[in-house]
Amino acid sequence: MYEEIRKPRLLKDIPLTLIRPLPTLYYANKFANKEIPDKIHRSYQSNVKFLNRALQIISKYLKNNDFESLAKEIDFLDVPPSSENIDKVQKFSISLAELCSDTKTALREQTHVIKTALMEIYSSLVNTIHVLVIDNSRGKEDIDKVLSILKNFCQYKVHHVHPESQEYIKSVIESDFILLYSTSSPEIHQQVKSLKTYHLPGIAMAQFPKNTDPDKETIRHGAQLIKIGFPVLFKMFTPIRMFTTIDKTYIQYHLKGNH
């Protein structure tokens, strides 16, 4: 979604929580096949319900019926995901961006109340995935920043564990998705291999010490992972790019028969 519909300023006026369901809706349709696993179907339907409810809430706060009218346009998402819906999802996303741009002043005036309302609805309606961060980092400040983005902006259920912890295996088994942070340790290659054993999707992220670039070992190990097809993030991306990458990888894994 992010890569395909992104234009320089397309998403800038859409409230972040309203952007949050779009990757799931886009990639579930993009990678759809005849059999949709229950966990993907539940996540998909809960995101559809949230988006519909969120648009109605904004319509109420802004006293603008255009948002409620837009909510009615997503009726096509009430059926199982299908690749035939891709163009409709893109068209909807653009219409949403244009409407938010047209009402950006009113949205900004109601930012706090709308954000609070949408986050409460998102927490109550959406089946969010459990992301486990395997902490190979060398500093608490760095990992705290990653955890904060995942929890507070991406709205995931988040737990983190050190590889040497007694809770390591239990934590991995109970998670839905693995984020390996960072790529500085050579042990990361064995950790990536173990994901196949546990049938889990994941990505790796390079460590970003404050005001410095990743070191050579971090880059080398990351490049080796990319070479075998494992996704690696070499930048501390915005929350939008972060949850888009995780949602895409998670959905593609389950719909492409990799599990």
Image (cartoon, rainbow, N blue to C red):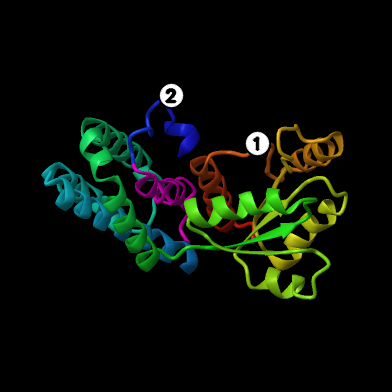
Q: For the residue carrying disc 1, how many other residues have a C-alpha within 10 Å: few (<14), some (14-19), or many (20+)? A: few
Please name the residue that numbered disc 1 is placed on. 235
First reached walking from the N terminus: tag 2 or tag 1: 2
Kindly identify which numbered label has been placed on residue 1. Answer: none
Q: Is residue 128 left or right of residue 147?
A: left
Residue type, label 2: Pro
Please name the residue that numbered disc 2 is placed on. 8
Q: For the residue carrying disc 2, how many other residues have a C-alpha within 10 Å: few (<14), some (14-19), or many (20+)? A: few
Q: Is residue 255 visible?
A: no
Q: Residue at x 85, y 34 (%)?
A: 216
Rounded to the nearest angstrom, the CA distance separating label 2 from label 1 is 19 Å
Quadrant of the rendered image containing residue 15 = top left
In the displayed structure, would residue 231 be above or below residue 157? Answer: above
Q: Position of residue 78 (x, y in %)?
A: 28, 58
Quadrant of the rendered image containing residue 169 = bottom right
Q: Is residue 39 left or right of residue 181?
A: left
Q: Does residue 25 show up magenta in the picture?
A: yes
Residue type, label 1: Lys
Q: Residue at x 39, y 26 (%)?
A: 9
Is disc 2 placed on a helix, strand or loop?
A: loop
Is disc 1 placed on a helix, strand or loop?
A: loop
Read off the magenta span.
15-37
Q: Position of residue 172 (x, y in %)?
A: 70, 68
Query: Quarter holding the N terminus?
Result: top left
